[in-house]
């Protein structure tokens, strides 16, 4: 069994953003030389997500509006966690969107359906944060 | 390390449905001959889910009502994504229910608790869609 | 490829609770002797979660209030599932928080970012329930 590890770094200039990282994960897979196995892609921070969905700008706006409705940023005082912090909503949003994606590798490729793309979801930006790519297989 | 891959196809005649696919995943596991490892089961489409929960009809109705409350289908015009499409809600519902399940394999069996069953969750039916079963192990 | 399996047992004296199980998962990893691979940690019950977030008491209260808002326990009669049961809300809450975490193993350690901790989320306590830890790798 072979294994491979890489960190992808982000410094998002806004509080929230969705960034397509599919090409970077594919580059990791090429570097690994692994042909059959699994890729784990996970946010290493607890106010961010890795998820798989559509690369469509309108949908990303819908995600943002919807997450703000489910777990609003303001008033920040509504959350017990916001005692010197203001990012409780980011911890909640990340639960809806998920921490990680596990992706099959077949024939040296990400084994994706027609529209699947991997995203980094940032909910508390303005700082350097990381995603882990771990690949195991043969 | 051995690996196995199969696609399960669905053509759900309604917009939304929950389909128990546990037997099909078990059949894949038998075909693979793998005794120790992991199974990844994921929707290959971004308006559908694979998740693990209870095979109880009342609960499935509760899921449907609840998801409609969290991310209503109508009015379709409330979503930016619905520009020639009407399935933005399906993209949101799939985030709540999840894309994938990762299941342990022990002694050639799905290593499940007493009530765990795997479901395909369709949120935008009336078309052919796929689930990927990828198994790695020995 | 090596594999390892252990069940962690819980008997939570309240209906809902969040329990940090990071030390127990690390102990499993040590016992396994696996240096490179993946850990799957999943609730074996469908009214409980395993998830990764912050070990901060205020945030856990926020999670509890938020989940009660998204999927209230009462009135129990609002759910079709609650026909002789009262735990439909626990099945819904578990979907938001997730069934499982998949964690990379690098150099014999859980490959975590600075604040990542693994939690057992109980939404229907007062009984014995289990979490599965399955590790594969070399």
Image (spheres, coloured by chain):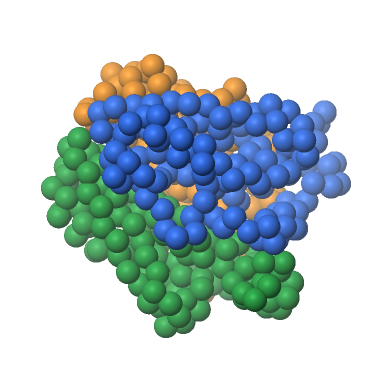
Chain colours: A blue, B green, C orange
Q: Is residue B122 above or below residue C42?
A: below
Q: Position of residue B68 (x, y in %)?
A: 61, 72
Please give left or right for residue C92 compared with residue B71 in the image: left
Q: Is residue B136 left or right of residue B86?
A: left
Q: Quadrant of residue A79?
A: top right
Question: Compared with residue C76, is residue C9 higher up or lower down, i.e. above or below?
Answer: above
Image quarter of the C terminus of chain C: top left
The answer to whether residue C108 is seen in the rendering is: yes
- Give coordinates of residue A127: x percent, y percent: 73, 28
* Residue nearest the viewer, comparing C83 with C115: C115
Q: Quadrant of residue A45?
A: top right
Q: Nearer the viewer, residue B13 or B114?
A: B13
Along the line of sight, the residue nearer the viewer: B95 or C97: B95
For the question of whether residue B50 can be seen, the reply is: no
Q: Residue at x 29, y 38 (%)?
A: A35
Residue at the image point whose x is 34% and y is 27% from the top:
A3
Please state the total of marks drawn on the protein image: 0
Say if A27 sits above or below C85 in the image.
above
- Residue sitting nearer the eye, C94 or A36: A36
Left-right relation of A85 to A43: right
At horizontal 20% and vertical 52% (from top left) the residue drawn is: B29
x and y percent of residue C88 in the render?
A: 52, 63
Locate the N terminus of chain C and report the quarter of the image it occupies: top left
- A56 left or right of B98? right
Percent of width and height locating residue B83: 68, 73
Q: Residue furthest bottom?
A: B13
Q: Residue at x 69, y 61 (%)?
A: A58
């Amino acid at each position: 069994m072979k294994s491979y590890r890489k960190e992808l770094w982000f410094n998002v200039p806004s509080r929230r953003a969705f960034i397509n990282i599919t090409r970077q994960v594919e580059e990791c897979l090429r570097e690994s030389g692994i042909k059959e196995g699994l890729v784990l892609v996970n946010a290493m921070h607890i106010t961010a997500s890795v998820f798989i969905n559509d690369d469509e700008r309108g949908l990303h706006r819908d995600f943002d509006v919807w997450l703000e409705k489910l777990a609003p940023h303001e008033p920040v005082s509504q959350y017990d966690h916001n005692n010197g912090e203001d990012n409780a909503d980011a911890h909640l949003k990340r639960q809806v969107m998920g921490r990680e994606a596990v992706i099959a590798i077949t024939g040296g490729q990400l084994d994706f359906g027609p529209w699947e793309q991997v995203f980094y979801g940032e909910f508390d930006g303005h700082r350097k944060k990381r995603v882990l790519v771990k690949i195991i297989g043969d």
